[in-house]
Image (cartoon, rainbow, N blue to C red):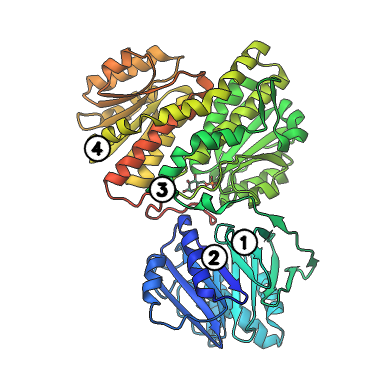
Amino acid sequence: MCGIVGYVGKREAYPILIKGLHRLEYRGYDSAGVALLNGDLKTFKCVGKVSDLETFAKDMDKTGSVGIGHTRWATHGEPNNVNAHPHYSESKNLAIIHNGIIENYAPLKEEMKSRGHVFLSDTDTEVLIHLIEDIQENEKIDLEEAVREALQEVHGAYAIVIVSKHHPNQLICARKGSPLVIGIGEKEFFIASDATPIVEYTKNVIYLDDEEIAVVKGTGELSIKTIKNQVKTPYIQKLEMQLEMLEKGGYDHFMLKEIYEQPRSIKDTMRGRLHVDKGLIKLGGLVDYENKLTHAERIIIVACGTSWHAGLVGEYLFEELARIPVEVEYASEFRYRNPVISEKDVVIAISQSGETADTLAAIEMAKSKGATILGICNVIGSSIPRTTHGGSYTHAGPEIGVASTKAFTSQVMVLTLMALLTGHNKGTITESRYHQLLNELELIPEKVKKVLTSDEQIKAIAAEFKDAHNFLYLGRGYNFPVALEGALKLKEISYIHAEGYPAAEMKHGPIALIDESMPVVFLCNNQSAYEKIVSNVQEVKARKGRVIGIVEEGDEIIQKLSEFTISLPRTEEPFSPILASIPLQLLAYHIAVMRGCNVDQPRNLAKSVTVE
Ligand code: G6P
C-alpha cells in the first residue's frame, strides 16, 4: 500500500527520497511522486514505477533540502498522473502525501467546491490539503493548528506529511491507523511509512502513535502533540534492522532470498525460547499471559492472507497439544459480525506487517469485549504489537517479497512453541511426548535446509507445468492449510488460478475439474490418514489428473502413483507444515519466473494492506 518518505535537513532531499521510495516499492504501488521545496514548491509525479518517475524528472530542477515522496496504491481514483501524490492545496503553497482513506471526503469536497475550491484529482487526499488551507485562511491560525483542526474533522485513516512554502525548513506529519516512523539524524529528520528507508541514515527512531502530529525542523527541533493539543514526550527507540537485510544479497529476487533464509529465520524464531536441555519453552512476551492461555475456554485466531493460513495450522496445534477449542477467523469478516466474545477468550492476532487494517480493527473490537489479545507479528514496533496485551515477535527479519514465505514458517513456529508451552502447562501432553517433540523441534532448521536441496528438482517440475491454466492443491489435517498456502503462493505471483482444498472434500466439487491437463499437488506427508490420502491420489489418477506428490522420504506407494514426487525429511506430524510449505514456495517461485512475472512485486498486490 502507499509508501511515504520525507526529509528535512542539510542534504539534498531528492536522492534520499528516491532511494526511500525504492525501498518502499515492496509495499505495492501504481504511481509515484515527489515534492521539493527550494523557494518554489515543485511537484513531479507520474503513473508507473519509481524508475519511471526518475526518467520523468531527469531534466528538472531537483534541488532542495526539504521534500516529500510517495508511492500510491490507488483507492479513490484510477492510477494516473493527476491522482498520484503529492497534492497541492488551492494556493499551491502546501503539498501533502497520504496513506489511508479519508472516508468523509465527499461531503467536505462538495462543501468546498460550493465555495469556489477547484479540485484537480479524484482523490480524498486532495480534499484534506484543501481543508487544511481553508481552515488556516479562515481562522488566521498557524499551519500546525490548522492541521490539528482539520484532522478532527476527518474520519478514516491517515499517515500524512505536509510541506509548506511558507515554512522552508519544516515538515508536519501525523498518523491515525496508518504507520509513520520518524528517523532522527544530526539536525535532520527522515520520515517514512516504515523503517526501511531510514535505517541507512540513523538507528534512532520514533514510532508516531495514532492521532499524534509531529513538527520536525532542519534546526533539529522536534515537537509532538495529539490532535487534542496535548504535548507528548518523544519516545526514541533503537532500530535492530541492518542494511544488508534490505538487499538481495546475490539472489535474483527477494522472494528467493527469503525462501533460502528459512533455516536461519526459523532458528531466530526459536532462539532463546527453546531450551531442549532444560525441557523448557520461554516466550518472554507471554509470561504474564501463560495462565490466561492455560485456562482459556477458547482461542480465536484473527488474521488475513498467509497469516490466516498460519492461524489454521495453529488450530490443529492448539487443539491437539493443548486441547483448547480454536476458531480461526478472517479479520475482515470477524470485525463486522457480532461475535460472541467473553473475558475467558484469548484472541491471537497474526500479522507479518503488524499493520493490516482489518486485523487491527478486529483486535480493537475483541479488546472492547474484554478478551485477552496476544499478537504474533514480524515488524518490530508496528501497530499491532503496540495494541495487544502481550505476544511474541517472529524475528524472521524484514520480509520484502510481497508473497510471504519466511514470515509464514516463523508464524507457524511461534504457534508451535505457544501450543507446546500451553499443553505442557496444562498437562495435556505427557512428559515423554513433550520432550520427544522438543528434541524434534530443534532439528527443524536443519531439515528445512535439506528440503532446499530439492530446488533443482522443483525447478524441473516448474518447467513442466509453467503453462498450466489451473492447479489444485490437496492436503489433509495439518497439511490442509499448507495446500491453501501453496495455492495462494502460485496465484499471487504467477497469476495461474489455483485452489487449495481438503483432499477428501475434493469429491464434493473440484473432482469435476480433473482431466489430463490438471496438475494436482498432493500433500502426502501426513503419517495419520495416510491410507486415506493414497485413496484420494488414486481418485485423481483415475481421472487422468497429473499428480505431484509431496511425500516423506522412504515413501514408495505415492512415489509410484505420482508423476513427480518431492521428498521431505521425516518429522513429527505437528511440525510437517513447516517442511511441506517450502517446496510449494519454490514451485510457485520458479513457475512465476519462467512466466516472466514480477515475482517481488506482483500486480495489484500490496505487502501490507493498511486500508479496509
Ligand atoms: C497482504 C500480503 C500477504 C499477507 C496479508 C496479511 O495480502 O500480500 O502476503 O499475508 O496481506 O498481511 P499481514 O501483514 O497482516 O500478515
According to the picture, the residue beneath numbered tag 3 turns out to be 250
Query: Element type at marker 2?
Result: strand
Q: Are marks 3 and 4 in contact (CB under 8 Å)?
A: no
According to the picture, the residue beneath numbered tag 1 turns out to be 180
Query: Element type at marker 3?
Result: loop
Within-10-Å neighbours for mark 3: few <14, some 14–19, many 20+? few
Circle nearer the N terminus (3, 4): 3
Within-10-Å neighbours for mark 2: few <14, some 14–19, many 20+? many
Q: Looking at this view, is 159 or 395 the one in front?
A: 395
Q: Looking at this view, is 101 or 260 the one in front?
A: 260
Q: Residue at x 66, y 51 (%)?
A: 381
Of marks 3 and 1, the one in the foreground: 3
Q: Residue at x 27, y 29 (%)?
A: 512
Circle nearer the N terminus (3, 2): 2
According to the picture, the residue beneath numbered tag 2 turns out to be 4
Q: Position of residue 382 (x, y in %)?
A: 63, 52
Q: Position of residue 357 (x, y in %)?
A: 57, 52
